[in-house]
């Protein structure tokens, strides 16, 4: 199973202090040495972590393929077409969100998506759509002619965290998931079954399937069992663990739990 390491969270640390370090560019060699298969970066419109210069340098210098996540705004597509990464994953963005809260409104944004996809594919860039795990979103992605979809696993990760970690006892508890363990367990099983069925459907329809958001060393294990998911993009938990064990070890450990 392929691992794309999202290195945005290194830039989060740098931008928190508005200084020059840590520089996400320094992560490239470490990711490659540790066996990562791809570098993933998200150039947000508000530039809260990755900056234009980061994206340019990373795409130019990475020995691994780079998956650039960006919004479907024309200005972002201009940048992507100029930088020409291996893949662009189109993602939704909200200014006020702490992190990407859900998948693209694939059925509601058809014309803007079509135009963005047309421009990217003209530059021979692979296109992926970051979508919620629903059949409508899978079908709409197929109709749009993209090569890849990436299922947003945030809901799965949130349920898992409320069920199996101390999150519910902290100030980051998720009020709408403040439910009994029995209900949370059922929701987690449903979410996994849904991801399994939809990944299989998508693959049979000819789409390549990735997944990501909120995955970590614990919750990733059941996702790894879904054989039709080819690739995972993981960032926050790898960078968080790297504070204690180092980036190389954090990636090696993640790769180890992803062995099928
Ligand atoms: C789209 C996505 O899920 C990732 O890019 C990741 O969450 C890092 O980006 P943000 O933290 O800015 O959402
Ligand atoms: N597309 C998901 C991604 O790149 C990584 O998300 P996260 O692990 O930082 O939540």
Image: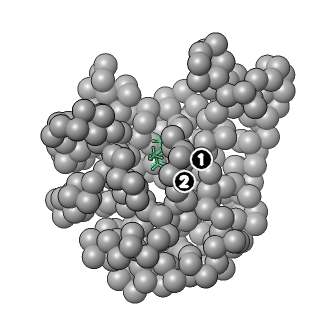
Q: Is residue 169 above or below residue 139?
A: above
Q: Is 222 on the left-hand or right-hand side of 86?
A: right
Which structural element holds mark 2?
Answer: loop
| Disc marking residue 101 | 1
Pair 1/2: label in front: 2
Residue 230 appears in the rendering: no
Which structural element holds mark 1?
Answer: loop
Q: Earlier in the sequence, mark 1 or mark 2?
A: 2
- Counting from the top left corner in percent of width and height, residue 154 is at 61, 42
Q: Quadrant of residue 54?
A: bottom left
- Counting from the top left corner in percent of width and height, residue 176 is at 75, 31
Q: Quadrant of residue 119?
A: bottom left
Residue 86 appears in the rendering: yes
Q: Is 220 on the left-hand or right-hand side of 84?
A: right
Q: Is 91 on the left-hand or right-hand side of 131?
A: left
Q: Is residue 87 above or below residue 250?
A: below
Residue shown at 56%/78% (left/top)?
112
Q: Is residue 133 above or below residue 118?
A: above
Residue shown at 24%/33% (left/top)?
17
Q: How many marks?
A: 2
Q: Is 104 on the left-hand or right-hand side of 230?
A: right
Instruction: Indicate yes or no: mark 1 CB to ligand 1 under 8 Å.
Output: no
Colour style of the rendered protein structure = one colour
- Counting from the top left corner in percent of width and height, residue 224 is at 57, 41
Q: Quadrant of residue 74?
A: bottom left
Query: Mark 1 to mark 2: distance in Å?
Result: 8 Å
| Disc marking residue 94 | 2
């Amino acid at each position: 199973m392929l691992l794309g390491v999202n290195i945005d969270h290194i830039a989060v640390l740098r931008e928190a202090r508005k200084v020059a370090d840590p520089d996400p560019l320094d992560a490239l060699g470490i990711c490659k040495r540790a066996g990562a298969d791809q570098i993933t970066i998200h150039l947000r419109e508000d530039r809260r972590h990755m900056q234009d210069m980061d994206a340019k340098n990373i795409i130019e210098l990475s020995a691994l393929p780079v998956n650039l996540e960006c919004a479907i705004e024309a200005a972002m597509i201009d940048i992507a077409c100029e930088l020409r990464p291996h893949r662009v994953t189109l993602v939704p963005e909200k200014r006020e969100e702490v992190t990407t809260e859900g998948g693209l409104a694939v059925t509601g944004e058809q014309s803007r998506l079509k135009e963005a996809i047309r421009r990217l594919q003209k530059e021979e860039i692979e296109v992926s759509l970051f979508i919620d795990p629903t059949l409508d979103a899978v079908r709409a992605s197929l109709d749009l002619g993209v090569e890849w979809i990436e299922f947003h696993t945030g809901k799965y990760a949130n349920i898992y965290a409320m069920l199996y970690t101390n999150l519910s006892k902290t100030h980051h508890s998720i009020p709408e998931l403040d439910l009994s363990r029995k209900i949370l367990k059922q929701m987690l099983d449903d979410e996994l079954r849904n991801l399994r069925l939809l990944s299989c459907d998508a693959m049979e329809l000819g789409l390549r399937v990735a997944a990501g958001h909120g995955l970590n060393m614990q919750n990733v294990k059941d996702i790894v069992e879904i054989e039709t998911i080819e690739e995972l993009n993981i960032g926050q938990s790898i960078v968080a663990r790297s504070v204690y064990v180092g980036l190389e070890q954090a990636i090696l450990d993640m790769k180890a739990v992803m062995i099928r």
